[in-house]
Image: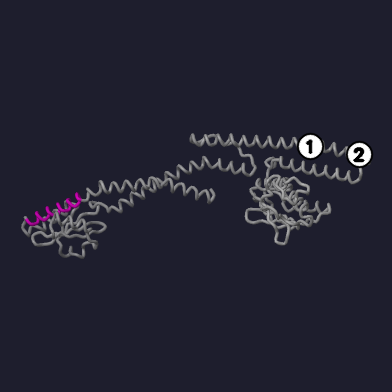
Amino acid sequence: MSGLSKRRLARKVALFALVPILGELVWVAVETLVFAEPLRPGYETELATYVKLSRAALVSMPRNARPAFLEEVNSRSEVRLLPSEPPFGEAMAPAGALPARLATRLRSRAGNDVDGRMGNTNTWVRFVAGGRPYWLVIPADRVPPPLWAQLFAATLIAALLSSGCAYILIAQLNRRVGPVGEAACAIGRGETPARLAIEGPEEVQELRRCFNQMSEGLQRLDAERRLMLAGIAHDVRTRLVRLQLNVELSLRELAGARADAMVNDIAEVDAMVTQFLELARSEADESPQSCDLNAIVAGICTRYRLSGHDVRSVLGHVGLPELREVAVGRLITNLVDNGLRHGEKEVEVATSRTGTHIVVTVADRGPGIRTVNPDALIKPFAREQTAHGKPGTGLGLTVVDRIARAHGGAVKLMNRPEGGLLVVVTLAAG
């Protein structure tokens, strides 16, 4: 799972868990106001009863019988009764004072001589009986926990339970929906994803079923488009061959300039048909494989130099990436053709690697793009106004962009400060 997917999952779990946590907070607040508060007077009454019973028992018996009474009480009850004198003086009592509200209510029920201390394990309540002070020690398990402790414990339990349930539910949902997103990304790269299995909850099944229908519809439309373009291009090329043959047979009857113009027009139309065929071709028909990109670039540049063009290469270390060799060759050829057609001077092709991407740059020495945003020329049939008199269809950069996206990359056009156009193509190394 990628870092972005993990962050999305954590955000969904947090949002999913927030609702029951808020509900638990409201419930604890209501429980505190409606149920917990009435229990506190009962607890204060219980303490006051212990104090009054202990005082009455101690006052009613002879002084010399009190030690035996204290021993009997302490051996039979969790609540202990101790004389407030060494070793059970102030030093033995906990350091914390009784909450003011509890102390006030306890004095109102058991007498103004009542005082106390509260610790982590027990509560010590001091009172006077027969002229002598005593400690009443109540264990912690008989003391109701503070309200903030109840609130914190309830919230923590709700958070753990709701977060765990949310994680399980959302993880299952992501596992069912994730392949749909991956298949959509594959379509965006020009690939043909496999048909999704119809499984999972009813809603997910419907989503997968609709996605399969959409994917199959797009594949049919793309196949029909490529078939139509290929058919048109084939018919046009057939007539071009016939026309070229007629022109060559009629060269003696035609003037030299007129014959040359006709031959050039035929060659230009043939180049346009070639670009239409390239646009109709699907990159999905070729599987990626490990290839030497530098060898591809060097071979293309060598062919152009043998034809008399000034095309040179600057090759960096790129390894052996997983690429569609034929498609990448078309990409580089289209860019070099554009550079020679519009730059009319030397063209430089460079390769390099940055992290997980291969970078191919093609730079020319022409005027650059002056009238429009350079990236706007990637659209089909888009051409700069100054280029309308030159051969071309405006499909070359469209084919380059499609091949780059099929390799998980992109195309960027920019004018060079020293003059000319720089085309930067990034390709995923695979």
Q: In the figure, residue 92 lies in which quadrant?
A: bottom left
Check disc 2: other Cα within 10 Å, few if <14, some if 14-19, many if 20+.
few
Residue 416: x %, y % from top left: 70, 59
Indicate which disc residue 250 carries. 2
Which residue lies under the disc numbered 1?
A: 236
Q: Please indicate whether residue 123 sits to the left or right of residue 186 in the image.
A: left
Check disc 1: other Cα within 10 Å, few if <14, some if 14-19, many if 20+.
some
Q: Please, what secondary structure does the residue beneath circle 2 have?
A: loop
Residue 372: x %, y % from top left: 68, 52
**Magenta-colored stretch includes residue 391:** no
Q: Residue at x 22, y 54 (%)?
A: 139
Q: Please indicate whether residue 287 sits to the left or right of residue 92 in the image.
A: right
**Magenta-colored stretch includes residue 58:** yes
Q: Residue at x 80, y 44 (%)?
A: 268
Residue located farthest toward the right when viewing the structure as drawn = 252
Q: Residue at x 73, y 50 (%)?
A: 385
Count the marks: how many? Answer: 2
Write down the region rendered in magenta: 41-59
Q: Give 375 or 105, whichever is nearer the viewer.
A: 375
Q: Please, what secondary structure does the residue beneath circle 1 have?
A: helix
Which amino acid lies under the numbered mark 1 shown in the image of this protein?
Val
Residue 155: x %, y % from top left: 35, 49
Q: Residue at x 78, y 57 (%)?
A: 346
